[in-house]
Amino acid sequence: MTLFTQAAFSTADAGTEALAFGRHIIRITAEQTGGSLGCFEAEVPAGEGPPFHVHEKEEEFFRVIEGTFAFWCNGARVELGAGSVICVPRGSVHRFQNIGQTTGRLMVVMTPGGFEGFFPAVAREANPTPERICQIGEQFNIRFVFDAAEAA
């Protein structure tokens, strides 16, 4: 990992595409920031979003670029539109869903960085099973929550 002594940036047309759970554009990696953070954009089709999950070691900051999203965090729910932001604490059970009628876009910053590698890792797999996705998730400190009591 390199030291974070110079600004890390991504121009409007830059980034690395990962097609896993929709289109993700990796904008800034943990490698570029000495592990401090990672940043990516997510394109989320209408009605879509991840299942409840927990990031064991990272805080997650979202900015809604386009669309309307519902966010759940530790049992609370909020609806946010373009320009809104939300920060989810590490260890919290959370999820989001595009509740609009068109594809929405999110800018996501994770601190510390590293989770942004999850999407390229899944994209490299040929038709991964849910079990395999969970195994990959473990490598990136994400745990999916399928227990309704824990998600409430």
Image (cartoon, helix red, strand yellow):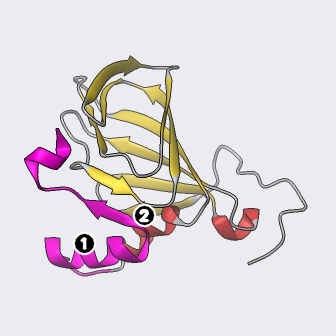
Q: Which mark is residue 104?
A: none
Which image quarter holds the N terminus?
A: bottom right
Outermost residue toward the right in this view: 5
> SS of the residue at dot 1?
helix
Residue name at image x 46 percent, y 20 percent? 82
In-front residue for pair 50/74: 74
In the rendered view, tell whether residue 116 sits above or below residue 71.
below
Task: Verify whether residue 130 appears in magenta.
Answer: yes
**How far from the left and from the top, in percent, is residue 71?**
32, 31
Instruction: Tell whether 110 sits left or right of 78.
Output: right
* Mark closer to the chain start, 1 or 2: 2
Task: Give the vertical position of 109 relative to 129 (above or below).
Answer: above
Q: Is residue 141 magenta?
A: yes
Mark 1 against mark 2, which lies toward the viewer? 1
Residue positioned 89% across, 59% down in the render? 6
Give the Cα separation between the discs numbered 1 and 2: 18 Å
The reply to whether residue 109 is visible in this rendering is: yes
Image height of 40 relative to 3, above or below = above
Marker disc for residue 18 = 2
Q: Is residue 46 left or right of residue 33?
A: left
The 10 Å Cα crowd at callout 2, few under 14, some 14 to 19, many 20 or more, is many
Image quarter of residue 151: top left
Residue at 24% across, 32% down: 75
Residue 12 sits in quarter: top right
Q: In which quadrant will I find the C terminus? A: top left
- Foreground of the two, 11 or 9: 9
Amino acid type for the residue under numbered disc 2: Ala
Label 1 with label 2: CB-CB less than 8 Å: no
Give the percent coordinates (x, y) of residue 106.
45, 37
In the image, what residue type sits under mark 1?
Cys
Q: Which residues are magenta?
A: 125-152
